[in-house]
Image (cartoon, coloured by chain):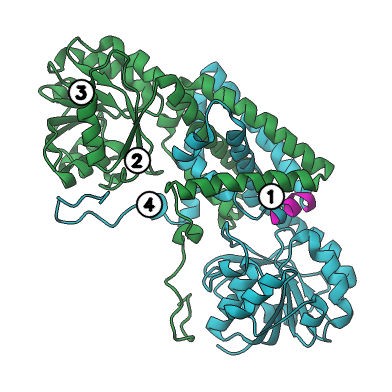
Chain colours: A green, B cyan
Amino acid sequence: MAVIYNRVALIGLGLIASSMAHAMRWKGLAGEIVGHAQSEASRATALEIGICDRVFATAAEAVQGADLVVLCVPVGAMEAIASEIAPHLAPGATVTDVGSVKQAVIDAVAPHIPAGVHFIPGHPLAGTEHSGPRSGFATLFVNRWWLLTPMPEGDEAATARLRSLLEGMGANVDLMDAPHHDLVLAVVSHTPHLIAYTMVGVADHLRRVSQSEVIKYSASGFRDFTRIAASDPVMWRDVFLTNREATLDILGRFTEELFVLQRAIRMGDGPQLQEYFTRTRAIRRGIIEAGQDTAAADFGRGTPPPPAADASVDPKA
Amino acid sequence: MAVIYNRVALIGLGLIASSMAHAMRWKGLAGEIVGHAQSEASRATALEIGICDRVFATAAEAVQGADLVVLCVPVGAMEAIASEIAPHLAPGATVTDVGSVKQAVIDAVAPHIPAGVHFIPGHPLAGTEHSGPRSGFATLFVNRWWLLTPMPEGDEAATARLRSLLEGMGANVDLMDAPHHDLVLAVVSHTPHLIAYTMVGVADHLRRVSQSEVIKYSASGFRDFTRIAASDPVMWRDVFLTNREATLDILGRFTEELFVLQRAIRMGDGPQLQEYFTRTRAIRRGIIEAGQDTAAADFGRGTPPPPAADASVDPKA
């Protein structure tokens, strides 16, 4: 695949930035990859593992001469970074970001972008519960959605060029407006995360069930919640602070609905519970058919290889 | 490994029963495996795929001559089955069950068990979102907990014998009393499942975000919820109906806690959110250290093999 940007500047060197670097190198999409992280340790790691060719102590230095700048910092840090880099952006450069909320990023970044520079907000729907420059891997974006919310007056050629980079890394790209993005994400990601954090917090507080038992017997429901609730705290703090209205809206609907089910439990209304649980199965089937997850049982968690023909093999050995 | 029971009768032929059958055959733990399911199709499947040597149209016939009877039906069906099989149980036989709630099963089953038969309630903390006789696999219980809640006056030798079967299938066995079991499970499994069902239901109702978008963009938080919410509706209906008090107790705590976080979002209290999200990370680390989950990023979901050395390979090809 051909080089799409001659110099890509990654601002912030966490999971998404390091995965982008691996993916761009794998596919030969970037001539040079430079980076900036606040922490000296992260910058040193980025050089050591080779995700950046050069690193800089300031974002202002890192963006100089870059034809693509990717803001990979928590949403709450976007405005300060945009203000810092603005005077140093090359004419014709593209600036994008990977924030989980889009209207707040537009409000924070767009006013700082000089004429002649293209700002195209973006959000890859990909991630793991790990963070830091060592957490990235080249295939993170393969077959995952990368949503772009271009400005109404945006340059179409610049968007097409960015899109070809994202597709080159294996992502599927869709365009939508920022408020709709924020509502969709409140449903499929932000509210579920808040709920998972809450459930794990409840377990943590409980005195009658000791924490060691919660950990020891964590069955599938709770185990999945703890994985979700292990995501980066600063990133998620900023998500809820900046997508406040949509999250509170969906949370309100969630609480209403929970009270309905809670009442059904209290009243012993079996048919209502069964009907509800039957309907939710259909959505799961849709997700598997859409290729966004696997139907494989238990995702192979902790499962040893298939039984050997020799029945004397002890799986615990 | 030696045969531990000469004839095992599986009553109900779903995920757990079929996995037990595969595991017992793999390890040679049972002389003969017989079974009963209400549905004729399930009985035919059980014979076809070989999980049962013989099947019976009634539970009463199936248990005759068995030295181990395993009740693998929804908790709400336990009493009727216990009443039906009671006159047909062999002297000295052991009856166990795999229900997710234990006090309700004891209340339903124990009064029917004749003198000279050992009733040892049990619950394997293992499962997938799939059901039916074809969903089982031999390694489902490997390195998973199997909790037993023996009756106070129970026979220790019978419990030790059952334990050796469960350990033979790869499970780790712990003993506790039934009320404590039900509280622990309300925290680590029942309440998380109800919450996941609720969140998926909310998404299903939303009109502004179309269902196709919810499915298309299902990010990790919601995707995990839909997997949980795809579990067997009848089984879960019975769980909530029979572990009502503990579930309502934990739900009440959950709602309180959720309101605290909701208020923090509304008030824009960043430090409180960040502090909360930081604490929940610790529980996750504990679970990984306890070997109940893997730290592997994204569980390999939809992730292709590692990048080839040939950079021209297109992962979407």
Are labels 3 and 2 assigned to the same chain? yes
State which region is magenta: B235-242
User: In the image, residue A246 lies at what x, y percent?
Assistant: 52, 22
Of all chains, the one bearing label 3 is A
User: In the image, residue B96 lies at what x, y percent?
Assistant: 74, 73
Give the residue number, with chain letter if any, for mark 2. A131
Q: Which mark is residue B186?
A: 1
Of all chains, the one bearing label 1 is B
In front here: A266 or B153? A266
Point out the frontmost of discs 3 and 2. 3
C-alpha gap between disc 1 and disc 3: 52 Å
Point out the frontmost of discs 2 and 4. 4
SS for dot 1:
helix
SS majority, magenta: helix
Give the residue number, with chain letter if any, for mark 3. A158
Disc 4 or 1, which lies upstream in sequence?
A: 1
Q: Residues within 10 Å of mark 2 (few under 14, many from 20)?
A: some
Are labels 1 and 3 assigned to the same chain? no
Q: Is residue A63 shown to the viewer in this render?
A: yes
Give the residue number, with chain letter if any, for mark 4. B302
Q: Is residue A45 shown to the viewer in this render?
A: no
In front here: A194 or B19? B19
Is there a contact, CB below 8 Å, between mark 2 and mark 4?
Answer: no
User: In the image, residue A86 lies at what x, y percent?
Assistant: 20, 14
User: In the image, residue B108 lies at what x, y percent?
Assistant: 85, 63
Is there a contact, CB below 8 Å, between mark 1 and mark 2?
Answer: no
